[in-house]
């Protein structure tokens, strides 16, 4: 850096000045020509020695000549210091940026990749530096865009897909000032490549459109049934028993629609309330008892045996209504997917900080490859069967949402034909008397 631009010019001047003094034959105390001493100083400065200065020896060279040369070196050092300070600041800014920045010089060589660009484009910044852009970036569209901007300076913006389903929003622009100063036609424009990872945004957009498609589909099915049966009732003469069965279908389908809307509202409420959840000490056994009481008629109607076993009572952190909803959803599933005569059990294990609750059944079970997906919205192992049994496919998504917002985890172990064990964890409130750990606002994990 010390050899270029104004610095190089100043060093040249210094050498010339030393040469003139040498021509006048002025010698240092050690007998060397003064200009040789100046040349040494210049060489040391060129090699990066910032402390190197011209010595003035009384009587051998006018002290003000040495002083002048040293003043020039001081000024140079100041300038270099300022430049390195600016460079360091620029480096901090580039490192702190959330947008990836790549600088390609007018000859098409990559001169800089900030850390975000290196991460998004999966390149090593040091390895990439100094290499032609087409060697560094294998993506054809990106290369073509850089080439165009380098040659004609026109900007380009698009999304490119990288291996691993990563979507990157790329903006290729020319660097105005640097480009304007190009002096030969062998050089192109200087180019900046700005990139942002938009994979997550794409995933969210896809989830949103899948969600809308699912909701529409789920609403369409009961609406079609209601309309069809209602049309028949309005337009045709039907006997009393047919009319009753049609009305029954209309009633059940309208119930399914209101359940779906209720579940959707619950999910949406959970999402919006997430940031200000209330945490209270809740007796786990009380919540289980409430859920069991509420489902007792269905349990009996389906001839299912219910067992509740626990390692003593435990106080958990949460909201009673939401935890009741978790228990109801899991118990309803256990009942719904267990043939008559089967058994449903609720147990819990206590650990120092948390409690693990199991809702198990001896029902139809879930194939291994589907177990991970049952917590997704609208996912049903056997869609027709679940729909026929009145399910909307949102129950477990609600369970997962509530448990996670209270810092817990959910999971399932299941074997087809033998039954399922759905479990979830909750944080324990050690001392219910002191509400220190249990009240106040919680930040959702
Ligand atoms: N205990 C279980 N045994 C077997 N399969 C189950 C059990 N619990 C859930 N499943 C499967 O997981 C799917 C998703 O369950 P989820 O509770 O989310 O929806 P659903 O029961 O179909 O409808 P709802 O929204 O009314 O609860 C179910 O459709 C079913 O296929
Ligand atoms: Mg369910």
Image: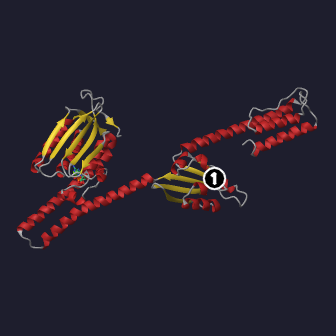
- Relative placement, left or right, of 80 versus 356 is right
Image point (20%, 44%), residue name:
360
Q: Which residue is mark 1?
A: 131
Q: Is residue 57 visible?
A: yes
- Relative placement, left or right, of 320 versus 95 is left
The N terminus appears in which quarter of the rendering?
Answer: top right
Q: Is residue 289 visible?
A: no
| Percent coordinates x, y for residue 378 in the rendering | 28, 55
Q: Is residue 399 above or below residue 53?
A: below
Image point (83%, 29%), residue name:
55
- Tell which residue pokes out farthest to the right in this image: 24
Ligand 1 within 8 A of label 1's CB?
no
- Identify which residue, 86 or 245, lies in the foreground: 245
Q: Is residue 5 above or below residue 168?
A: above
- Tell which residue pokes out farthest to the bottom in this image: 236
| Percent coordinates x, y for residue 2 in the rendering | 74, 41
**Colouring rule applied to residues:** secondary structure
| Percent coordinates x, y for residue 177 in the rendering | 66, 53
- Relative placement, left or right, of 223 versus 53 is left
Image point (13%, 73%), residue name:
235
- Identify which residue, 430 or 441, lies in the foreground: 430
Please tell me in which quadrant of the rendered image residue 409 appears. Answer: top left
* Circle 1 residues within 10 Å: few <14, some 14–19, many ≥20: some
- Tell which residue pokes out farthest to the left in this image: 240
The C terminus appears in which quarter of the rendering?
Answer: top left
Q: Is residue 262 above or below residue 90?
A: below
| Percent coordinates x, y for residue 213 in the rendering | 32, 60
Q: Is residue 119 above or below residue 443?
A: below
Q: Secondary structure at mark 1?
A: loop
Number of on-image labels? 1
């Amino acid at each position: 850096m010390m050899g270029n631009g104004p610095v190089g010019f100043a060093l040249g001047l210094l050498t010339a000045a030393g040469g003139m003094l040498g021509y006048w034959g002025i010698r240092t105390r050690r007998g060397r020509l003064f200009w040789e001493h100046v040349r040494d100083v210049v060489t040391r400065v060129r090699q990066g020695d910032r402390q190197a200065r011209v010595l003035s020896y009384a009587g051998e060279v006018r002290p003000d000549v040495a002083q002048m040369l040293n003043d020039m070196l001081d000024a140079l050092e100041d300038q270099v210091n300022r430049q390195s300070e600016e460079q360091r600041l620029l480096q901090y800014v580039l490192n702190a940026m959330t947008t990836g920045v790549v600088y390609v010089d007018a000859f098409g060589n990559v001169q800089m990749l900030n850390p975000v660009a290196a991460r998004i484009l999966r390149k090593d910044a040091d390895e990439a530096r100094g290499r032609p852009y087409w060697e560094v970036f294998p993506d054809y569209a990106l290369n073509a865009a850089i080439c165009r901007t380098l040659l004609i300076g026109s900007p380009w913006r698009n999304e490119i897909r990288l291996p691993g389903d990563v979507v990157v929003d790329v903006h290729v622009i020319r660097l105005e000032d640097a480009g304007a100063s190009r002096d030969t036609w062998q050089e192109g424009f200087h180019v900046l490549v700005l990139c942002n990872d938009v994979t997550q945004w794409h995933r969210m957009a896809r989830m949103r459109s899948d969600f809308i498609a699912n909701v529409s589909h789920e609403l369409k099915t009961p609406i079609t049934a209601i309309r069809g049966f209602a049309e028949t009732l309005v337009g045709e003469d039907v006997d009393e028993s047919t009319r009753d069965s049609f009305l029954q279908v209309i009633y059940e389908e309208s119930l399914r629609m209101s359940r779906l809307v209720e579940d959707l509202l619950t999910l949406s409420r959970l999402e919006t309330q997430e940031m200000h959840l209330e945490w209270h000490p809740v007796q786990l056994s009380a919540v289980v008892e409430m859920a069991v009481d509420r489902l007792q008629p269905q349990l009996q109607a389906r001839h299912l045996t219910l067992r509740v076993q626990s390692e003593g009572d435990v106080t958990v952190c949460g909201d009673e209504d939401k935890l009741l909803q978790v228990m109801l959803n899991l118990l309803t599933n256990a009942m719904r997917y267990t043939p008559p005569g089967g058994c449903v059990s609720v147990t819990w294990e206590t650990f120092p900080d948390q409690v693990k609750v199991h809702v198990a059944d001896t029902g139809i079970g879930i194939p291994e490859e589907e177990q991970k997906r049952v917590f997704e919205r609208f996912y049903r192992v056997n869609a027709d069967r679940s729909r026929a049994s009145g399910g909307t496919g949102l129950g477990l998504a609600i369970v997962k949402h509530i448990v996670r917002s209270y810092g817990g985890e959910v999971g399932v172990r299941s074997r087809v034909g033998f039954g399922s064990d759905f479990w979830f964890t909750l944080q324990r409130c050690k001392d219910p008397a002191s509400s220190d750990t249990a009240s106040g606002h919680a930040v959702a994990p």
